[in-house]
Amino acid sequence: MVPALRYLGSVCGRARGTFPGSFSAARTPASGKSRLLCQGGRRASTSSFDIVIIGGGIVGLASARALILRHPALSIGVLEKEKDLAIHQTGHNSGVIHSGIYYKPESLKAKLCVQGAALIYEYCNQKGISYKQCGKLIVAVEQEEIPRLQALYERGLQNGVQGLRLIQQEDIKKKEPYCRGLMAIDCPYTGIVDYRQVALSFAKDFQEAGGSVLTNFEVEDIEMARESPSRSKDGMKYPIVIRNTKGEEVQCQYVVTCAGLYSDRISELSGCNPNPRIVPFRGDYLVLKPEKRYLVKGNIYPVPDSRFPFLGVHFTPRMDGNIWLGPNAVLAFKREGYRPFDFSARDIMDIMIKSGLIKLVFQNFSYGVNEMYKACFLSATVKHLQKFIPEITISDILRGPAGVRAQALDKDGNLIDDFVFDGGVGDIGSRILHVRNAPSPAATSSLAISGMIVDEVQQRFKL
């Protein structure tokens, strides 16, 4: 086994085709059946694979790509419940290429983010994908923040982050003329990119190498094949049956799950341990009006509070020229609840009964109330933003998009901040690898994560 992986104990013929020119080909057919995203692939040949990846976000697609490039003789399929790829966490994040400064030295987050950032830049250069290495300032605006800032700087050096330097007020003004601060970390290696574009490029690589992507395939059941009286060859070779909500089936030898907001439920479907449970946190962004974009040149972040995995409200330039302000971090009442009043009774019951959320709320009551207040009243968020750029007023901003973070939480109410991978025991458990927790910076780290996943798949499944 790969020694760096964290485990939670004892838990539980290729379809060739040419990738279509654009993802308009991914539209769901009128029949509503799952759609094979490649031209020329034989429908019958998509029912059996050597390896299936559940989840068509950036981590799942990066892993599928890495698997087929390393094992081109294997038939590999990706199953995605939506009609298009990479539309949830991948398509709703801030687009920042993180440098790796924040994370505990020697943690998977630190190692994979530093490696992943270098790989993302290299990949974008190879594929001609636009990005901007616009840098980031982490700014202390109060005297009491300076020791934390200096400690963060030391952590970044330990993690091997490139180009870090501590700067004073005059240099802050040179980088960000409208930003005030006592001291800052200049992090020039930070960048921005459209991660959905990157993910779709991963999908294109995967399909051009012979992989198959089935969209509109929402997994409902994972079980061992019931051996037929004829003892069919396929039943022997592909013992795992994955069934969707329409009754369609895919058979395979091995499974890798990269299900994001549904990672706990997919694990439970396979007979593995559902813990850690996923609790969705919605992050609402504001958008700076076009005529005020001149106020921000690169990323501007506050000094983070180490008690929480959230980095605080910050200023983020986007590839389309917009400037996002935020996000906050409030409980979402639906796993894909991008609007304040989106609600799912099942999701709420899962959060309240099966997770440690109640303990988390009691431990961090004032923080949660403050986040809810900022979500309701723009003036509260603007007041925070003015600590960094005093010129910003409430008339300069608009409400913007939102994302939902799949945060893993243990039974004691502790936020699980590092990447978590596990497998299981038994007939299915021994043939499955779950990516259980891949929070930010998973997009930045996706290529590095995929390499680790392929190493583990190779070792675990004896490929």
Image: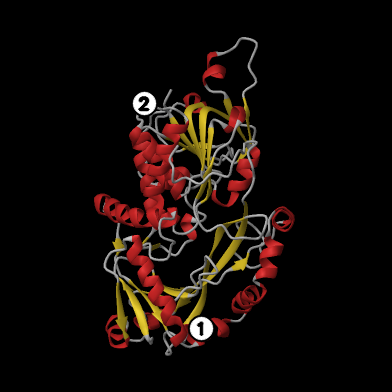
Tell me the kind of residue under disc 2. Ala
Label 2 crowd bin: few (<14), some (14–19), many (20+), radius 10 Å: few
> Which of the two residues, 435 or 344, is positioned nearer the viewer here?
435
Measuring 63% from the left and 68% from the top, which residue is drawn there?
340
Measuring 37% from the left and 79% from the top, which residue is drawn there?
293
Query: Any mark on residue 423, and which?
Result: none
SS class, disc 2: loop
- Residue 338 position, x and y percent, is 58, 63
Q: How is the image coloured?
A: secondary structure
> Which of the two residues, 372 or 293, is positioned nearer the viewer here?
372
**Residue 315 in view (yes/no):** yes
What residue is pinned by disc 1?
384
Q: Which quadrant holds residue 14? A: top left
**Residue 338 in view (yes/no):** no
Above or below — where is 53 with respect to 199? above
Above or below — where is 192 with respect to 231? below
Query: Any mark on residue 73, and which?
Result: 2
Circles 2 and 1: CB atoms closer than 8 Å: no
First of labels 2, 1 by sequence position:
2
- Residue 314 position, x and y percent, is 45, 75
